Amino acid sequence: MKAKKKWLSLLGAAVMAAALVVAPGAKEVKAAGAPVVTSSIQDVSASVGDEISIPITFTSESTNLSAIHGEPSGGYDTSVLEYQGAEYVGIPAGMESTAGGNFGYVTSGNFSSGTINVKFKVLKCSAAPVTVKISNIYFSNHEYLDSEATELTAKVTISHPADQYQTNQTDPTCTAPGHKTVTCGVCGATIEDKDLDALGHDDGEWVVTKEATCTEKGVKELQCTRDGAVLDTQEIPLAEHTWDEGTVTKEATCTEEGVKVFYCTGCQASKTEAIEKTPHSWDEGTVTKEATCTEEGEKLYTCTECEEIKKEVIQKTPHKWIVNDKTDKDGWEVITEATAEKEGSKERVCAVCGEKETAVIAKLTPAPETKPVDTANQTSGSTTSNTSGSSANAVNTGDTAMAAVYVVIIAAAACAAGALVVVRRRKTSH
C-alpha cells in the first residue's frame, strides 16, 4: 500500500481523482484480495543506433488491474543502452510516468493482461550481451492492493559494426598451421578465433641443380612452389660424349685396315674406329690357259700394290663345226631324208674335239593335187604352168644339194610344158 502511494503521488491529485471516480450507476466492487500476476521477459538482438523494445508480457487471475510499476534504473549498462521509456500494449488508456528512470502506468479501466515494451536506444556494442534487469515490478487493482513484486532479466545481444573489424592473422605454411583472430575495434570483443590448417606442399617443376656431363651424373630436384622445400631428388644420367671430327693415325691399304682416333671435346676421352681396306689395284691380267670348246680357260690378275693374285675363269669357246660339200653352212649333213610319212635326221661334227650333234628333220608337207590343163579353152599365145605343190615345200632339211636337184626337176618340167605349147601353136597355124 505504501509503494502504490509513492508512485501515485507522482501522478498528481488530478490523476488520482480521475482514478477514484465511480461512474454513475456503477456498483461498488468489494476487495477481493491482492492480484496474482504471472510475467515474463524476452531477450533481443540489435545493432548500434537501433531503438529496441524489450517486451514484458503479463497475465493476471483477476480482471480488475488498474496500475503498473517497474524500475529498470540501475539494471543496465548506461554507456551501452539509453532508457527511452515504456510502451503499453493491450491496456486501456491511462496516464504514464518515467520519473526517476522508472516506469509507471495507471488507468480507470480494468485489464488482466498485456505487454509492456521497455524501450532503449543502443549507443554502442559490447564484448558480451548486455544484461537488462528490471526490478520491483508489480501490478495494482482498484482496491489499492498490489501483487507480489518480481524482478525480470533480459539479454541484449548487439552486433558489432563490420567496418570496425580488426583482424590479426598468422598465415599457415606448408608444414605449420596458422591462426586468425577477429576483434571488434569498438568494444574489443572477439568475433572470430580459429586455427588455420597447414597448407601442405605444392609440387612444382623439376629443377636441375647440377648439370650432367660425360663424366659425372647430374641432379634434379622437385621443389615446393611455396617454400622451396625439396620433395624429391633424382639423378640425371651421364651425357653423351661430344666427339671431334677424328684424326687418321694409320692409313688403310688393300691388305690392312686403317685407324681413326676421335677425342671428346668435353673430357678428352678417345675412341678408335677402323677404316676399311682399300680395293686392290688389279693389272690387265694374263691368260694362263686358253679356253677350248671342251675346257674353260684361266686368267690371272695381280695387284700392283700388294701382288695378291686372283683367278678368273674364261668360258668355253663355241664348237667349230666341219663344213664341206656334204654339209650346209652350219655344218649339218643329212643322214636320212625326210618324207611325208617319216622324219629325217641330220648331224654335225666339231672339227676340234670331234663332238657330234644330231637333230631331227621334220616330215615333208604333202603337195596339193594338180588339176588337168583344159587346152580347149586356152587362147592363142597363152601358156599355163602349174607348179603349185612343188617339192620345194617338201624340202625341210637344210640340205642345199637336195634343193638343187629339185630345182633342176622343176626347170625340166617347165621346159617340156613350153615345148608342148609351141607345137600346138604350129598345128593351129597350118
Image: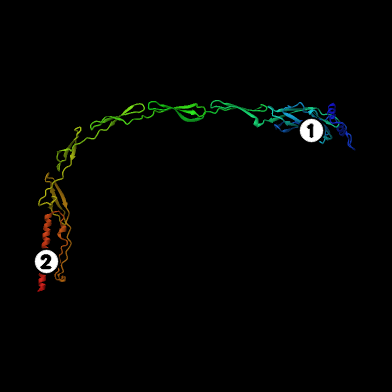
**Image quarter of residue 274:** top left
Residue at the far bottom: name it.
430
Position of residue 71 in the picture relative to residue 292 (left or right): right
Task: Return the residue nearer the eye: 19 or 331.
Answer: 19
Task: Return the residue nearer the eye: 359 or 132.
Answer: 132
Return the disc, 1 or 2, that comes first in the chain's sequence. 1
**Image quarter of residue 135:** top right
Task: Check the image and report above or below for 110 versus 395.
Answer: above
Residue at the far right: name it.
25
Residue 418 tag number = 2
Q: Secondary structure at mark 1?
A: strand
Say whether residue 194 is visible. no
Q: Secondary structure at mark 2?
A: helix
Say what amino acid the circle numbered 1 marks: Thr
Q: Position of residue 96 (x, y in %)?
A: 81, 33
Say whether residue 207 is visible. yes
Count the marks: how many?
2
Residue at the image position 10 percent from the left and 69 percent from the top: 423
Q: Position of residue 286 (x, y in %)?
A: 16, 38
Q: Looking at the rendering, in which quadrant would you find the C terminus?
A: bottom left
Residue at the image position 10 percent from the left and 71 percent from the top: 426
| Dot 2 alpha-carbon crowd within 10 angstroms: few under 14, some 14 to 19, many 20 or more | some
Residue 24 tag number = none
Residue, disc 1: 59
Q: What colouring does the structure picture have?
A: rainbow
Q: Position of residue 75 (x, y in %)?
A: 75, 26
Q: Looking at the rendering, in which quadrant would you find the N terminus?
A: top right
Position of residue 24 in the picture relative to residue 172 (left or right): right
Label 1 – label 2 distance at C-alpha: 178 Å
Position of residue 98 in the picture relative to residue 168 (left or right): right
Q: Position of residue 116 (x, y in %)?
A: 77, 33
Say what amino acid the circle numbered 2 marks: Gly
